[in-house]
């Protein structure tokens, strides 16, 4: 981990190739880049206070199970992207808030989403062309 901090000025893509650093970087990118994490961070970022109750998030994140939302929020809390606050009420109220680190992730995520929007039509066209290719000799499908 120390080596990664020393190489901060290196080209970010190079971190994916360097064998000692690659595992840590890929593991973190896989975690932060999964669909539920992105959705939760973006939805918290859209809230006026960057804060929401668990039940609110569950309603906002279409298709997520209670267990997956809990797992995602726990991972975000562990990595310092959200703070969890439990209020001593009956029933207990739990709220999650983006930290400064979580807020700093919003711009790259918004850029990624914008890139997808800008390129989605050409990606769909590439998929269609690929799917129309004949299968057979010389094909890896």
Image: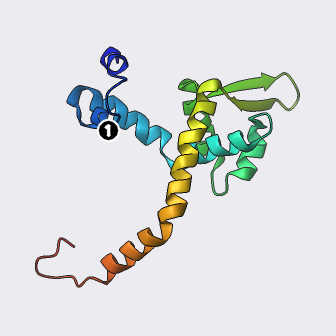
For residue 80, what is the image quadrant?
A: top right
Q: Is residue 72 visible?
A: no
Q: Is residue 51 or residue 59 the one in the foreground? A: 51
Q: Is residue 120 or residue 68 the one in the foreground? A: 120
Q: Position of residue 33 (x, y in %)?
A: 47, 44
Q: Which residue is mark 1?
A: 13
Dot 1 crowding, Cα within 10 Å, few <14, some 14–19, many 20+ = few
Taking 17 as reference, is 83 above or below it?
A: above
Q: Is residue 50 left or right of residue 124?
A: right
Taking 139 as reference, is 26 above or below it?
A: above
Q: Is residue 1 left or right of residue 48?
A: left
Helix, strand or loop for disc 1: loop
Taking 23 as reference, is 138 above or below it?
A: below
For residue 74, what is the image quadrant?
A: top right
Q: Is residue 138 visible?
A: yes
Q: Residue at x 34, y 79 (%)?
A: 129
Taking 111 as reference, is 73 above or below it?
A: above
Q: Residue at x 55, y 44 (%)?
A: 109
Counting labels gives: 1
Q: Position of residue 93 (x, y in %)?
A: 82, 31
Q: Position of residue 48 (x, y in %)?
A: 80, 38
Q: Residue at x 74, y 39 (%)?
A: 54
Q: Is residue 105 or residue 63 the one in the foreground? A: 105
Q: Residue at x 33, y 16 (%)?
A: 6
């Amino acid at each position: 981990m120390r080596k990664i901090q020393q190489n901060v000025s290196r080209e970010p893509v190079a971190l994916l190739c360097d064998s000692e650093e690659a595992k840590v970087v890929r593991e973190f990118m896989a975690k932060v880049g999964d669909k539920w994490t992105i959705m939760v961070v973006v939805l918290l970022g859209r809230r006026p206070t960057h804060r929401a109750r668990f039940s609110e998030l569950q309603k906002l994140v279409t298709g997520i199970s209670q267990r997956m939302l809990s797992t995602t929020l726990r991972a975000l809390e562990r990595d310092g992207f959200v703070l969890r606050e439990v209020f001593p009420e009956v029933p207990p109220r739990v709220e999650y808030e983006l930290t400064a680190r979580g807020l700093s992730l919003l711009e790259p995520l918004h850029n990624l989403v914008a890139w997808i929007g800008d390129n989605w039509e050409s990606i769909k066209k590439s998929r269609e062309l690929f799917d129309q290719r004949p299968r057979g000799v010389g094909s890896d499908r």
